[in-house]
Amino acid sequence: GAGVSQSPSNKVTEKGKDVELRCDPISGHTALYWYRQSLGQGLEFLIYFQGNSAPDKSGLPSDRFSAERTGGSVSTLTIQRTQQEDSAVYLCASSFSGVQPQHFGDGTRLSIL
Amino acid sequence: QQQVKQSPQSLIVQKGGISIINCAYENTAFDYFPWYQQFPGKGPALLIAIRPDVSEKKEGRFTISFNKSAKQFSLHIMDSQPGDSATYFCAAAGNTGKLIFGQGTTLQVKP
Protein backbone atom coordinates (compact mmCIF):
# COMPACT_ATOMS: atom_id res chain seq x y z
CA GLY A 1 0.00 0.00 0.00
CA ALA A 2 0.87 3.63 -0.15
CA GLY A 3 1.37 4.05 3.59
CA VAL A 4 1.58 2.18 6.88
CA SER A 5 -1.75 0.59 7.68
CA GLN A 6 -2.87 -0.28 11.20
CA SER A 7 -5.93 -2.18 12.37
CA PRO A 8 -8.21 -1.87 14.13
CA SER A 9 -8.27 1.92 14.32
CA ASN A 10 -10.10 1.71 17.66
CA LYS A 11 -10.36 -1.09 20.19
CA VAL A 12 -12.35 -1.14 23.41
CA THR A 13 -11.94 -4.13 25.67
CA GLU A 14 -12.42 -5.19 29.23
CA LYS A 15 -9.61 -5.38 31.75
CA GLY A 16 -8.03 -8.82 31.72
CA LYS A 17 -8.75 -9.59 28.07
CA ASP A 18 -6.05 -10.17 25.45
CA VAL A 19 -5.78 -7.88 22.40
CA GLU A 20 -3.96 -8.10 19.08
CA LEU A 21 -2.96 -5.05 17.08
CA ARG A 22 -1.87 -5.32 13.46
CA CYS A 23 0.55 -3.33 11.35
CA ASP A 24 1.08 -3.51 7.59
CA PRO A 25 4.27 -1.60 6.74
CA ILE A 26 5.06 0.17 3.49
CA SER A 27 5.94 -2.39 0.82
CA GLY A 28 9.69 -3.00 0.69
CA HIS A 29 10.41 -1.55 4.12
CA THR A 30 12.43 -4.05 6.12
CA ALA A 31 12.52 -2.12 9.39
CA LEU A 32 9.38 -1.89 11.52
CA TYR A 33 8.88 -0.11 14.84
CA TRP A 34 6.14 -0.04 17.46
CA TYR A 35 5.61 3.01 19.67
CA ARG A 36 3.04 3.92 22.29
CA GLN A 37 1.56 7.38 22.75
CA SER A 38 -0.17 8.31 25.98
CA LEU A 39 -0.94 11.59 27.73
CA GLY A 40 1.32 10.94 30.66
CA GLN A 41 4.28 9.35 28.90
CA GLY A 42 4.36 10.96 25.47
CA LEU A 43 5.70 8.87 22.58
CA GLU A 44 7.61 5.79 23.76
CA PHE A 45 9.52 3.20 21.77
CA LEU A 46 8.37 -0.39 22.30
CA ILE A 47 10.14 -2.73 19.85
CA TYR A 48 12.12 -2.74 16.61
CA PHE A 49 12.12 -5.39 13.88
CA GLN A 50 14.67 -5.81 11.13
CA GLY A 51 13.13 -8.39 8.85
CA ASN A 52 11.54 -10.98 11.12
CA SER A 53 14.06 -10.50 13.93
CA ALA A 54 13.65 -8.15 16.88
CA PRO A 55 17.12 -6.88 17.85
CA ASP A 56 15.68 -4.32 20.26
CA LYS A 57 12.78 -5.17 22.56
CA SER A 58 13.93 -2.82 25.30
CA GLY A 59 10.77 -0.72 25.33
CA LEU A 60 8.24 -3.48 26.02
CA PRO A 61 6.82 -2.49 29.44
CA SER A 62 6.19 -6.01 30.79
CA ASP A 63 6.05 -9.66 29.83
CA ARG A 64 2.37 -9.18 29.02
CA PHE A 65 3.52 -7.46 25.83
CA SER A 66 4.86 -9.41 22.86
CA ALA A 67 5.22 -8.84 19.15
CA GLU A 68 6.04 -10.85 16.09
CA ARG A 69 6.63 -10.22 12.44
CA THR A 70 6.16 -12.78 9.71
CA GLY A 71 7.32 -12.85 6.10
CA GLY A 72 9.26 -9.66 6.70
CA SER A 73 6.01 -7.76 6.40
CA VAL A 74 2.98 -7.76 8.73
CA SER A 75 3.55 -7.38 12.44
CA THR A 76 1.26 -8.13 15.36
CA LEU A 77 1.56 -6.60 18.83
CA THR A 78 -0.18 -8.69 21.49
CA ILE A 79 -1.09 -7.50 24.96
CA GLN A 80 -2.19 -10.20 27.38
CA ARG A 81 -4.33 -9.68 30.46
CA THR A 82 -4.84 -5.99 29.65
CA GLN A 83 -4.72 -3.41 32.41
CA GLN A 84 -6.17 0.10 32.48
CA GLU A 85 -2.69 1.60 32.22
CA ASP A 86 -2.37 -0.07 28.80
CA SER A 87 -4.88 2.45 27.41
CA ALA A 88 -3.01 4.46 24.79
CA VAL A 89 -2.56 4.92 21.06
CA TYR A 90 -0.26 2.24 19.63
CA LEU A 91 1.66 3.48 16.61
CA CYS A 92 3.57 1.51 14.02
CA ALA A 93 6.27 2.92 11.76
CA SER A 94 8.39 1.48 8.98
CA SER A 95 11.54 2.51 7.17
CA PHE A 96 13.70 1.20 4.36
CA SER A 97 16.30 -1.14 5.79
CA GLY A 98 16.57 0.66 9.12
CA VAL A 99 17.74 3.80 7.38
CA GLN A 100 15.62 6.77 8.30
CA PRO A 101 13.07 8.25 7.72
CA GLN A 102 10.34 6.40 9.58
CA HIS A 103 6.79 6.67 8.29
CA PHE A 104 3.97 6.24 10.79
CA GLY A 105 0.51 4.77 10.55
CA ASP A 106 -2.46 6.47 12.20
CA GLY A 107 -2.35 4.09 15.15
CA THR A 108 -4.76 1.94 17.11
CA ARG A 109 -6.53 3.71 19.96
CA LEU A 110 -6.83 1.14 22.74
CA SER A 111 -9.25 1.71 25.61
CA ILE A 112 -9.37 -0.65 28.57
CA LEU A 113 -12.58 -0.50 30.58
CA GLN B 1 21.07 10.16 28.84
CA GLN B 2 18.38 8.90 26.49
CA GLN B 3 16.12 11.90 27.03
CA VAL B 4 15.27 14.60 24.57
CA LYS B 5 13.96 17.76 26.21
CA GLN B 6 11.58 19.96 24.21
CA SER B 7 10.27 23.44 24.87
CA PRO B 8 7.93 25.23 25.01
CA GLN B 9 5.06 22.90 25.85
CA SER B 10 2.65 25.20 24.02
CA LEU B 11 3.00 28.16 21.68
CA ILE B 12 0.61 30.74 20.28
CA VAL B 13 1.71 32.71 17.22
CA GLN B 14 -0.04 35.22 15.00
CA LYS B 15 -0.52 34.38 11.33
CA GLY B 16 2.60 35.39 9.41
CA GLY B 17 4.82 35.17 12.46
CA ILE B 18 7.76 32.88 13.21
CA SER B 19 7.26 29.80 15.40
CA ILE B 20 10.34 28.51 17.20
CA ILE B 21 10.56 25.20 19.06
CA ASN B 22 13.70 24.04 20.83
CA CYS B 23 15.12 20.65 21.75
CA ALA B 24 18.17 19.47 23.67
CA TYR B 25 19.77 16.04 23.96
CA GLU B 26 22.49 14.39 26.00
CA ASN B 27 23.54 11.28 24.11
CA THR B 28 26.35 12.10 21.70
CA ALA B 29 25.71 8.82 19.87
CA PHE B 30 22.56 10.30 18.36
CA ASP B 31 23.15 11.06 14.68
CA TYR B 32 19.72 11.72 13.23
CA PHE B 33 17.32 14.45 14.34
CA PRO B 34 13.84 14.56 12.76
CA TRP B 35 10.85 16.76 13.44
CA TYR B 36 7.36 15.34 13.21
CA GLN B 37 4.00 17.11 12.86
CA GLN B 38 0.89 15.49 14.29
CA PHE B 39 -2.76 16.41 13.79
CA PRO B 40 -5.48 15.04 16.11
CA GLY B 41 -6.40 11.45 15.31
CA LYS B 42 -3.46 11.03 12.93
CA GLY B 43 -0.01 9.53 13.23
CA PRO B 44 3.10 11.71 13.29
CA ALA B 45 4.21 12.86 9.84
CA LEU B 46 7.86 13.58 9.08
CA LEU B 47 8.39 17.28 8.46
CA ILE B 48 12.14 17.70 8.13
CA ALA B 49 15.28 16.01 9.45
CA ILE B 50 18.96 16.80 9.90
CA ARG B 51 22.21 14.98 10.59
CA PRO B 52 24.98 16.52 12.72
CA ASP B 53 27.34 17.18 9.82
CA VAL B 54 25.33 20.28 8.85
CA SER B 55 24.26 23.24 10.97
CA GLU B 56 21.10 24.18 9.11
CA LYS B 57 18.58 22.65 6.75
CA LYS B 58 15.71 24.46 5.07
CA GLU B 59 12.68 23.02 3.33
CA GLY B 60 10.13 25.60 2.27
CA ARG B 61 8.96 27.49 5.35
CA PHE B 62 10.57 25.00 7.74
CA THR B 63 14.18 25.27 8.94
CA ILE B 64 16.17 23.16 11.38
CA SER B 65 19.09 24.81 13.14
CA PHE B 66 21.57 22.41 14.74
CA ASN B 67 24.24 23.23 17.32
CA LYS B 68 26.39 20.14 17.85
CA SER B 69 28.60 21.60 20.60
CA ALA B 70 25.59 22.70 22.64
CA LYS B 71 23.66 19.50 21.81
CA GLN B 72 20.65 21.56 20.81
CA PHE B 73 18.47 21.83 17.73
CA SER B 74 15.46 23.89 16.86
CA LEU B 75 12.61 24.14 14.37
CA HIS B 76 11.70 27.48 12.84
CA ILE B 77 8.40 27.85 10.98
CA MET B 78 8.44 31.02 8.91
CA ASP B 79 5.25 32.82 7.86
CA SER B 80 3.20 30.60 10.18
CA GLN B 81 -0.29 29.73 8.92
CA PRO B 82 -3.45 28.54 10.73
CA GLY B 83 -3.01 25.21 8.92
CA ASP B 84 0.28 24.78 10.79
CA SER B 85 -1.67 24.47 14.05
CA ALA B 86 -0.69 21.00 15.29
CA THR B 87 1.54 19.22 17.77
CA TYR B 88 5.23 19.12 16.89
CA PHE B 89 7.69 16.54 18.17
CA CYS B 90 11.43 16.57 17.93
CA ALA B 91 13.26 13.25 18.09
CA ALA B 92 16.72 11.78 18.05
CA ALA B 93 18.06 8.41 16.91
CA GLY B 94 21.30 6.51 16.86
CA ASN B 95 22.35 3.56 14.73
CA THR B 96 19.42 1.34 15.72
CA GLY B 97 16.95 3.83 14.29
CA LYS B 98 14.97 3.82 17.53
CA LEU B 99 13.44 7.30 17.91
CA ILE B 100 13.59 9.05 21.27
CA PHE B 101 10.93 11.75 21.24
CA GLY B 102 10.64 15.08 22.98
CA GLN B 103 7.51 15.81 24.98
CA GLY B 104 5.79 17.70 22.17
CA THR B 105 4.76 21.31 21.53
CA THR B 106 1.19 22.31 20.77
CA LEU B 107 1.24 25.17 18.27
CA GLN B 108 -1.73 27.44 17.68
CA VAL B 109 -1.52 29.95 14.86
CA LYS B 110 -4.14 32.67 15.22
CA PRO B 111 -5.68 34.14 12.04
Image (spheres, grey):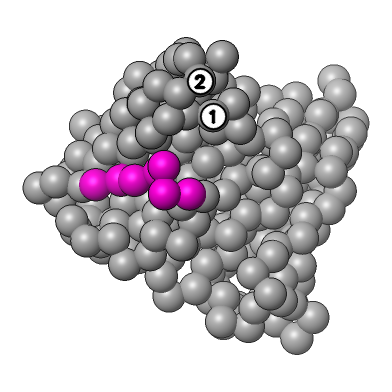
Above or below: residue A87 compared with residue B93: above
- Chain letter of mark 1 equals A
Q: Please, what is the three-letter code of the amino acid marked with disc 1?
A: Gln
Is residue B31 shown left or right of residue A49?
Answer: right
Above or below: residue A21 compared with residue B100: above
Where does the N terminus of chain B fall, quadrant-wise? bottom right
Q: Secondary structure at mark 2?
A: loop
Residue count near mark 1 (Cα–Cα under 10 Å), binned few <14, some 14–19, many ≥20: some
Q: Please, what is the three-letter code of the amino acid marked with disc 2?
A: Lys
Q: Nearer the viewer, residue B5 or A110?
A: A110
Above or below: residue A45 compared with residue B37: below
> Residue at the location (66% across, 43% down)?
A42
Residue B73 horizontal/vertical position (percent): 73, 67
Label 2 belongs to which residue? A15
Residue A66 horizontal/vertical position (percent): 34, 46
Say which quarter of the image contains residue A21: top left
Residue B49 horizontal/vertical position (percent): 55, 60
The dot on residue A83 is 1
Q: Nearer the viewer, residue A3 or B83?
A: A3
Is residue A66 shown left or right of residue B111?
Answer: left
Q: Nearer the viewer, residue A35 or A31?
A: A35
Is residue B21 shown left or right of residue B28?
Answer: right
Q: Are the residues tagged 1 and 2 within 8 Å (C-beta)?
A: yes
> Residue at the location (77% across, 42% down)?
B105
- Chain letter of mark 2 equals A
Q: What's drawn in magenta, residue-wise?
A: A62-68
Residue A38 seen from this side: yes
